[in-house]
């Protein structure tokens, strides 16, 4: 056999072998990395879809919160994982739109991941405690002008970080970075707790992370970043307040693997997610939290994420929030 023929035969054999390996995927439990802490929007979304998704996959899903650096620590864990589909990421707007837009030294880019879907969109709501005496955005802005106001977030470079500053700027605070103190926390749940215990004055976060606190009367929403009202949130919309530009502030959740995730594996995830997101209980639970379930295929997901990155990069440049170190 000629060398060229032998080489071709080896290559074809390797292709068939690889296909055979992934044809049986998954043969064991799959590790699902949540790059933010318990109680935040990403954690809530991931754990709510875990049951219907696990049923669709047919193997256990091992949910692990790997936190730190505004979602970067967990993201890097998946970036560096084998491309066999056994370590996947619940990617979030903070980790894969805001972080790349804000951090010059981020240890990954969007090209380091292969997105199999985006499945959830949720608006942002700004909230305070009822005990704060703040009952409207006008009240909040007046307090900011007096001084001593702070806002919490799920970390430097997170959507919550950018949202707090952007909201203040849209309401006439010329230099929001100095007018209010940013207090980063380890996840969205901790950011809400910081407002509850008085560590921070307010936060602007995804409606899904605030829904239970609002329903229990622990937090008072001041505004939602939508053209239309959000169920369960008795607060004016950005449009009601004449701040339509704030409608750009939305969260999203998707699933991604390393950039070289095989086609066969990605296709299986597409089928599993179609089944999981059709689950009635999942839809009812997430809708009650103000989320919109919108399943995107890989092409749609990548176009959407790139669009979000472009929007936030422009905002970061405008606000002077780029982190160079």
Image (cartoon, rainbow, N blue to C red):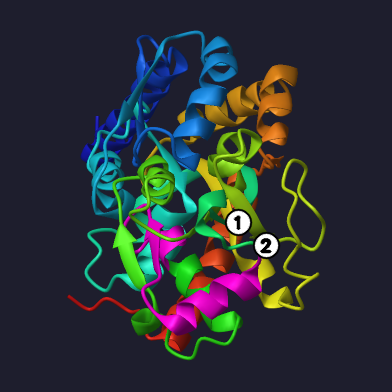
Q: Give how far across and how far down residue 168 sits, in percent.
A: 52, 77
Identify residue for label 1: 124
Q: Is residue 139 left or right of residue 237?
A: left
The span from disc 1 to disc 2 (Cα, nearest Å) is: 5 Å
Residue 32 shown in magenta: no
Q: Nearer the viewer, residue 135 or 287?
A: 135
Residue at x 59% of width, y 23% of height:
272
Q: Nearer the viewer, residue 182 or 217?
A: 217
Q: Is residue 216 left or right of residue 99?
A: right
Q: Give how far across and how far down residue 213 sits, in percent.
A: 56, 38
Residue 125's place in the image compared with 141, above or below, is above
Q: Nearer the viewer, residue 320 or 179?
A: 179
Q: Give how far across and how far down residue 172 sits, in percent.
A: 58, 87
- Local crowd at mark 1 within 10 Å, few (<14), some, or many (≥20)? many
- Local crowd at mark 2 within 10 Å, few (<14), some, or many (≥20)? many
Q: Which numbered circle lies on residue 225?
A: 2
Q: Quadrant of the C terminus?
A: bottom left
Q: Is residue 176 left or right of residue 66?
A: right
Residue 5's place in the image compared with 49, above or below, is below
- Tags 1 and 2 in contact by the CB under 8 Å rule? yes
**Which contiguous range is marked in magenta?**
136-161
Q: Quadrant of residue 156?
A: bottom left
Q: Quadrant of the N terminus?
A: top left
* Res. 118 in view: no
Q: Quadrant of residue 215?
A: top right
């Amino acid at each position: 056999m000629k060398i060229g023929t032998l080489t071709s035969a080896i290559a074809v054999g390797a292709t068939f072998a690889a296909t055979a390996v992934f044809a049986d995927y998954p043969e064991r439990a799959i590790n699902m990395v949540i790059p933010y802490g318990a109680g935040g929007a990403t954690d809530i979304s991931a754990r709510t879809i875990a049951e219907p998704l696990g049923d669709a996959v047919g193997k256990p899903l091992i949910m692990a919160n790997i936190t730190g650096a505004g979602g970067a620590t967990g993201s890097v864990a998946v970036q560096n994982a084998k491309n066999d589909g056994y370590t996947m990421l619940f990617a979030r707007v903070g980790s894969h739109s805001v972080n790349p837009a804000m951090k010059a030294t981020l240890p990954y880019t969007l090209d380091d991941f292969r997105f199999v879907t985006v499945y959830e969109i949720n608006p942002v709501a700004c909230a305070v405690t009822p005990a704060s005496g703040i009952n409207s955005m006008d009240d909040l802005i007046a307090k900011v002008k007096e001084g001593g106001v702070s806002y919490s977030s799920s970390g430097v470079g997170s959507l919550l970080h950018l949202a707090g500053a952007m909201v203040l700027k849209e309401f006439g605070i010329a230099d929001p970075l100095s007018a209010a103190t940013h207090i980063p926390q380890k996840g969205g749940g901790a950011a809400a707790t910081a407002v509850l215990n008085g560590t921070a004055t307010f936060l602007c976060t995804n409606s899904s992370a605030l829904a239970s606190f609002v329903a229990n009367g622990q937090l008072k929403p001041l505004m939602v970043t939508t053209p239309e009202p959000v169920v369960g949130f008795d607060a004016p919309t950005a449009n009601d307040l004449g701040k339509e530009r704030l409608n750009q502030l939305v969260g999203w959740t998707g699933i991604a693997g390393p950039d070289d995730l095989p086609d066969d594996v990605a296709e299986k995830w597409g089928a599993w997610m179609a089944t999981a997101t059709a689950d009635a209980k999942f839809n009812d639970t997430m809708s009650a939290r103000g989320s919109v379930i919108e399943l995107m295929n890989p092409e749609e997901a990548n176009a959407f994420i790139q669009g979000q990155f472009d929007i936030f990069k422009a905002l970061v440049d405008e606000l002077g929030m780029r982190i160079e170190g």
